[in-house]
Amino acid sequence: MQPTAADPALRESFLALLRSLAAAHALDAEELEQQVWLRAAAERPRSDPRSRLRALTVQEFRRAREEARGRVRELEAVARLAAARTAAEAASPEQRALGAEEARELRAAIARLPARCPALLAALLELPPMSYRELAEELAMPRGSIGPTRSRCLACLRRLLLGQQPILPGNR
């Protein structure tokens, strides 16, 4: 039997779990429910739709929670950037010149990164920050690959800036 939202008993069997998870982590319960139903509709019919809906609910909750945590980290990064800009504006001419040189070096290093890295890092630095969903659409890449790709790009950038040989995809 394929689970559907048209079955009120089935819907109620997991809705309390979904709402409690969403409320505990300040997530949108309706969006979470929609994602669960979309995933359930895309799967082959199962013999036990109740347990599958519970599993899908937990999986979608974890995905949404990680996405929300990513947005919080991005907002914290924006706040740090704003504080740095404020400090830079109050800096002496020498400090501003050094900061400008560091920024040029950083932009040059980002430009030398492989594949999607320059576009992804540039998009991540946009203000206001984009959600992972917006980034996925903008860069035409799966939403679930943004975080891992970002991590690999930052590791490669770090190695470039430290003067080490970067580990490029396919170069491991």
Image (spheres, helix red, strand yellow):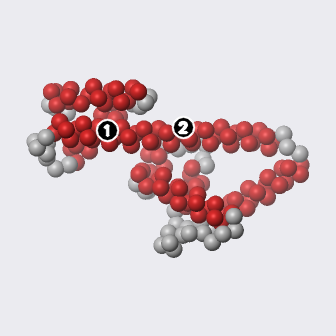
Mark 1, other Cα within 10 Å: few <14 / some 14–19 / many ≥20: some
Q: Is residue 123 above or below residue 79?
A: below
Q: Going 63% across and 72% down the picture, which residue do you hit?
A: 165
Q: Going 75% across and 42% down the picture, which residue do you hit?
A: 85
Residue at far bottom of view: 171
Q: State the SS at label 1.
A: helix
Who comes first in sequence, dot 2 or dot 1? 1
Instruction: Report the mark closest to the observer, 2 or 1.
Output: 1
Q: Which residue is mark 1?
A: 58
Mark 2, other Cα within 10 Å: few <14 / some 14–19 / many ≥20: few
Q: Quadrant of residue 110?
A: bottom right
Q: Amino acid at mark 2?
A: Val
Query: Is 86 on the left-hand or right-hand side of 15?
Result: right
Q: Give the CA separation, mark 2 to mark 1.
A: 21 Å
Q: Is residue 121 above or below residue 87?
A: below
Q: Going 50% across and 42% down the picture, which residue do you hit?
A: 70
